[in-house]
Image (cartoon, coloured by chain):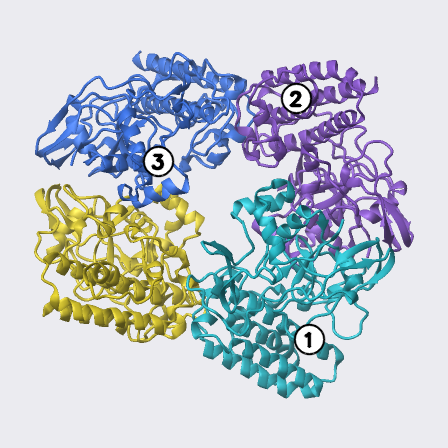
Chain colours: A yellow, B blue, C purple, D cyan
């Protein structure tokens, strides 16, 4: 049965990602937005326990009465939960206990799945697997944040540094003027925010088939980009000054030049590699400096079949807002996307940290304009 | 000469608005976003001194060497400036000195205007007058904030309470599907953010020809709207809880029912009057509760000729972003609009506090989603 | 009758101090700890209205029902009050109205005083006058804070700059070892914190008969005193670094050398003048650098008859704690001193801003260790 | 050799205390003031490496070049250090690596100690052992803070709950009036803050021979003690209201009555047990409510031989200030005590968490008035 195989494959991949960790690495949280590995392992299991097993499997006995409180993320429908900033405050449950919880849930799910006849329930489990894939990427970005801020700069996995790839294409792709359809067509899985498919008027344009590299960005830095207010949005300029920003996240200037932390450890910045870990503000300032602009998410989507994409989440010029006809699902899963539709910007594409089989051209990722701990990059287009 | 007359009329109106004030009222600032009347009077004069007289009138002698520092608002190009939050820290210059400054600038402008031959310079003065009109509305909203938070609830002008009007129309207006042109056509003055005029694909819809009233909103309150998380955006729900919001700004519950502060003094809430002083979050939650939604700024604009508008700034579903082909002007006036194009939402229409001759259907006002001290209201449309 | 004369003299002096002000100066508050002149005028009147007239004069009609809310400072017994940080938020009542309030209270008091037969009530009025004298000094220090932070650096009164005096004596005064009595002996007015008179064991020592001058302190600055952590208390070192402190309050370095704001306007720092506007932390660091120490309040008091004092409030090494046998009075006036007996340090002496007839050698002034807006200085003694 | 034995005994006791921990427990820090076990183990070793081995043992090779940065606490003399609040951000070094560091330092110390002939160096090692004993108590209080804030309320060691003891004596002890000597007499080890021994005038009084119990304190709670402003110091009243304090730390009200977290797990509050985990503010408010007061540290010390003490650190009425003739040692160890002499209050006695052989009647412990995570209690005396 395909769902069983998908379930096993996705769930196993989360544990594979954890293989290089020490027990101590599972525990630490240093900023509110980056959760500890232990929590990711527990939360992705909680999703199946809370929304599938507790509600649909009459035989299910919850593993522990307080795990719902510990591992709920942001679902108001699912009740009280520990503060997000406090996820790293928990020495208990131990790592061993969290794995026991995962395996308990897995056993129950594997016993339960074959009995499922209802398409809605089937789709809910598919949603749970996509949810877990999102957390697999977050696992990597959150872990990078902790290790990359440790004075010892320990490597996660020297075989996987993930940011050294460069452009494999060049040139531009032409965009034709006219009305085009945007959004998911309903074939296969998609999140609710990719619906409904609707028409958009697209202007003619020309979009780069390559992303901005570290070499490009070093020029911006050396030209005083971070000191020139006229390149920045007002909120961006405040952010730069309040946080003394002068380079992408994980970069630091040394006597031997710029270095950056990667999951394979500390390295000199590779000028050919694609720029990574920048905010929307930096993307806009760089584009302004370059006399170019960011594509809208619609321009990106209508060009996607002709573009080389997938190494970086690409900031777009579009705010994260509902598509015409958008409606959220009832209950807790309706909190998945819709309530976040303010203050955030859309990113398109995927990154080297994205889990296998978890990308498509209609995918709408979204983060706050100042956030940089994802593998974010930038594609320009002509003004 | 029309420009001289416009200059005199607009400048005089600022002083007319100040007529009911006591000296003390000119001085006080209680929140960063609401500046004191003295500062508005100085800043609007500074605009002409800094951008017109200092740069184009060779005969001009600045009034005071430090007024540039005191009365610059947010123009990085124009140098250092006092922190916005500190505008109320200044007992000096006195009100009398600020009026002397205004009149000094006016004399210089009136002597200078007849000599102008350059269209760009002419347009810059027109921009300065529109700028002053914007500050006239801010004068009223900022003053209301100070007086409305004074325990004595003093009236500004008992003849002008400004919020008691109700709907004069009913029914809905149909929107037709298709490609339509959006933005200013270039006839008469418009801000740079209204350009370039461009095509947008509009879906069919139905927009209300009336605004939400206090009666409507009281139902929402009584139905527990402020306590029901499922109606709110995530950022809105945080805002409601962090600030203990349970009613529009200036409302307070008393033993005799809801009352609100108006510029004519404290009054019982009039159920027939149009709802005023709500945030974007409250607008969205109310719409959600009502099974309706906010129009986009494009839906609003294509319907505007058929709508009754002008009593409240109407929150739209559109983020404040540049139109295709937008480019900011060089130098300081380029900071007027463009750099604010993140985090804010577009409001359309105008309000009872808007200055005469300062509204048009392509006007794009913008505020942060939590802001309520403007005369903001809400028009719904069917989902 | 002496009390009537005292009442009139003290009350009038508050208004004399206000003579050089513009209306705007009465209104502004820029930090929580420094209240606007309008508030001082109202609050000192409120003391008599609230504690004397309302409670003891059956004929008294309160001036305005909300003035109690507006002009209570910190008396929990006297009910709700406006937040201290919001005293500058009030454009109303106007200055004229506050003077009307003062005069209304004065008339009632002058009519009421002759009828008083009760000693407790007499003493309460004496307390009210001492209270007003304290606010007269605060009036000057608070006003200096507002004007001294105005970019225009306006003078209050060019005839009174108040900080230019230097030492008039030299040498040291010997302190003899043994048991001595400390505290007020009950002759004349004293605050409750000066009681009870009790015995203290004093060690032999030698205390300077002169205060630290600006010349002395400039040496400390030039020697890197503000950069040398080993001179500072832990809390002081945090304070220096968190606030980037590098000189006394009101000092600023210019191309022509150090200048400071005085109530007579901006001037070059006078090296012979007594050091002023320093924190307890700076006092301690300077003493440490000098190989000396601050006297305790007991050492100060037993030497006071032989010392030249009265130009600066002198930081002592003593924490503000109750004397043996201290007991606070019942009711609101019991909140005058006792509840502040934690976190603060004792200052002894008086300053050039202290009101006439408001100093004595047992007087215990107290402020937080970081506070500098009082006219604070420093006397050293040998370790 | 006694020093070798002392070294081995004290160092081993730190590891004994860690025996019940899981790896995860070593890592977590949830507030700035409570450090993780891993850090305590590293820091106490660093003390010997930094101050003894690096400076006096020519053969010593540092274990790791960055451990100085990671394990310095507050010694400015010893260079840069990780922010105190970030001690829990470190998943690496692992627990295993920290133990390796300890054992490396121990081997070097045990090889080095026999060669020591210098008394100052001997005393420095004794200081290091007393330092480690202080951290042993902090280990318990910090660990209790983490486990006691975990929703699972895990026990540390069910055999050691540490707070259940009650009074074993009753009655009062008379204090005689007169001059008495205070401070350490120089026999055996003492911290610099216990010197110099000096004379103090003591008033006659009567001090309880028993401590306040939970029963006593429950009466205070039930009588509305936390709601009655007139019992509290101003700073205490702000603290109660800002933090919604309504019981000692670790207490919580349940349907079955008050319960508290102990290191042996969650238990009903035992009314006979000595009150624990209160702030100085609560101590003062309780005393005020009781018509009594706290003893000064001098009253405590002169009575100590006749008192039963050692179960709770007892808040005194004395601010933590230097004794007459106090002088700090040169260099880093001079930072041990002296720089903390502001804002803190003296506690006398010892607690059930104090390490064996680490208490004496002249010992001056000190904490900020709001701090409660130590095993703090209260002894009253008559006013």
Q: Nearer the viewer, mark 1 or mark 2?
A: 2
Q: Mark 1 to mark 3: distance in Å?
A: 70 Å
Q: Residue at x 41, y 22 (%)?
A: B256
Residue B218 can be seen, yes or no:
yes
Q: Residues within 10 Å of mark 3 (few under 14, many from 20)?
A: some
Quarter of image, res A305: bottom left
Relative to C197, A373 lies left or right: left
- Indicate which disc residue B335 carries: 3
The residue under label 1 is D357
**SS label for mark 1:** loop
Residue C367: quadrant of the picture? top right
- Determine crowd level at label 1: few under 14, some 14-19, many 20+ residues with C-alpha closer than 10 A: few
* Chain of the residue on which disc 3 is drawn: B
The residue located at (57%, 36%) in the rendering is: C31
User: Is the residue at mark 1 from the same chain as the one at mark 3?
Assistant: no
**Letter of the chain that mark 1 sits on in the rendering:** D
Say few, some or many: other residues with alpha carbon within 10 Å of mark 2 (under 14 / 14 to 19 / 20 or more). Answer: some
């Amino acid at each position: 049965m395909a769902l069983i195989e998908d379930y096993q494959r996705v769930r196993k991949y989360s544990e594979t990602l954890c293989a290089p960790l020490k027990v101590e690495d599972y525990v630490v949280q240093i900023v509110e937005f980056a959760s500890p590995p232990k929590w990711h392992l527990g939360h992705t299991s909680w999703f199946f326990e809370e929304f599938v097993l507790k509600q649909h499997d009459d035989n299910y006995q919850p593993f522990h009465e307080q795990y719902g409180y510990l591992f709920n993320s942001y679902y108001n429908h699912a009740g009280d939960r520990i503060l997000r900033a406090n996820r790293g405050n928990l020495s208990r449950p131990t790592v061993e206990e969290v794995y026991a919880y995962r395996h308990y849930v897995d056993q129950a799910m594997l016993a339960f799945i074959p009995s499922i006849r209802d398409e809605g329930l089937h789709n809910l489990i598919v949603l749970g697997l996509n949810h877990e894939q999102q957390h697999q990427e977050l696992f990597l970005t959150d872990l990078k944040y902790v290790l990359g801020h440790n004075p010892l700069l320990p490597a996660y996995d020297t075989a996987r540094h993930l940011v050294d790839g460069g452009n494999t294409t060049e040139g531009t792709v032409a965009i034709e003027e006219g009305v085009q359809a945007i959004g998911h067509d309903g074939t296969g899985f998609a999140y609710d925010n990719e619906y409904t498919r609707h028409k958009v008027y697209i202007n003619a344009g020309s979009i780069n088939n390559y992303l901005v590299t570290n070499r490009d960005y070093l020029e911006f830095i050396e030209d005083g980009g971070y000191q020139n207010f006229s390149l920045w949005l007002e909120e961006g300029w405040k952010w730069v000054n309040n946080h003394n920003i002068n380079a992408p996240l994980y970069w630091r200037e040394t006597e031997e030049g710029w270095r950056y932390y990667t999951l394979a450890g500390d390295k000199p910045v590779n000028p050919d590699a694609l720029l990574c870990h920048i905010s929307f503000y930096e993307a806009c300032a760089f584009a302004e400096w370059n006399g170019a602009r960011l594509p809208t998410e619609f321009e990106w989507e209508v060009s996607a079949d002709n573009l080389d994409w997938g190494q970086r989440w690409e900031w777009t010029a579009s705010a994260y807002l509902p598509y015409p006809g958008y409606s959220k699902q009832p209950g807790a899963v309706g909190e998945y996307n819709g309530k976040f539709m303010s203050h955030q910007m859309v990113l398109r594409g995927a990154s080297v940290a994205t889990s296998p089989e978890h990308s498509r051209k209609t995918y709408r990722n979204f983060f706050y304009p100042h956030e940089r701990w994802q593998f974010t990059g930038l594609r320009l287009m002509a003004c």
